[in-house]
Image (cartoon, rainbow, N blue to C red):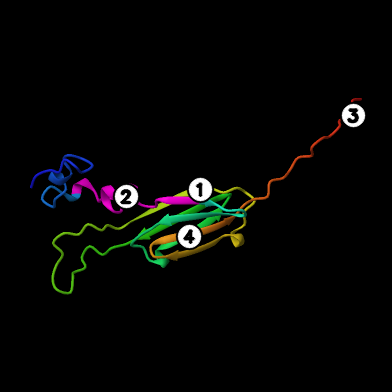
Amino acid sequence: MLPSIFSEDLFDDIFDDDFMRFPAWGSRALYGKHAKNLMKTDVRETDDTYEVDVDLPGFKKDELSVELKDGYLTIQAAKGLDKDEQDKKGRYIRQERYAGACSRSFYVGEGVEPDQVSAKYEDGILKISLPKQVKKELPKKSAIAIG
């Protein structure tokens, strides 16, 4: 087994097999070293909305939650895997999927109400639509009396 010079870390392949993994070192995060690639987000602006697309491949609809609280839109995804589960034809030799949770928050302003936000999950992409807040315009000119 030779380490790959094209991976994120020269020693990934050496220290990433089951022989070198001890329970005392703790469990690995959701999707291991690739967790930083999770929840990639695109935000588009239209005339009256902001459209947010979040990549969440491998999740089911019931493993996701979207919450709007105190002006923050929070997206959470949690996945659980049973480590003792066996394949119908035998035991797992290598399992690279992990259990865990991830979340991401965006400040959307205090004026957005939860009933104004819509969300749809399809083909591994969570699509959220938020209304734009109407900007309050200040009076153009106001005279102040001097006493």
Q: Which residues are magenta?
A: 24-43
Query: Amino acid type of disc 2?
Result: Ala
Q: Which residue does the numbered mark 2 point to in the structure image? A: 35
Classify residue 60 by image quadrant. Answer: bottom left
Tag of residue 85: none
Residue 108, x across and y down, in percent: 57, 49
Query: Amino acid type of disc 1?
Result: Phe
Return the disc, 1 or 3, that comes first in the chain's sequence.
1
Classify residue 114 by image quadrant. Answer: bottom right
Query: Amino acid type of disc 3?
Result: Ala
Badge 1 vs badge 4, beta-carbon distance below 8 Å: no
The residue drawn where x is 52% and y is 57% is 67
Classify residue 126 by image quadrant. Answer: bottom left
Q: Which residue does the numbered mark 3 point to in the structure image? A: 145
Q: Which residue does the numbered mark 4 point to in the structure image? A: 127
Is residue 13 found left or right of 102 in the rendered image? left
The residue closer to the viewer here, 35 or 98, is: 35
Q: Which residue does the numbered mark 1 point to in the structure image? A: 106
CA gap between label 1 and label 3 equals 43 Å
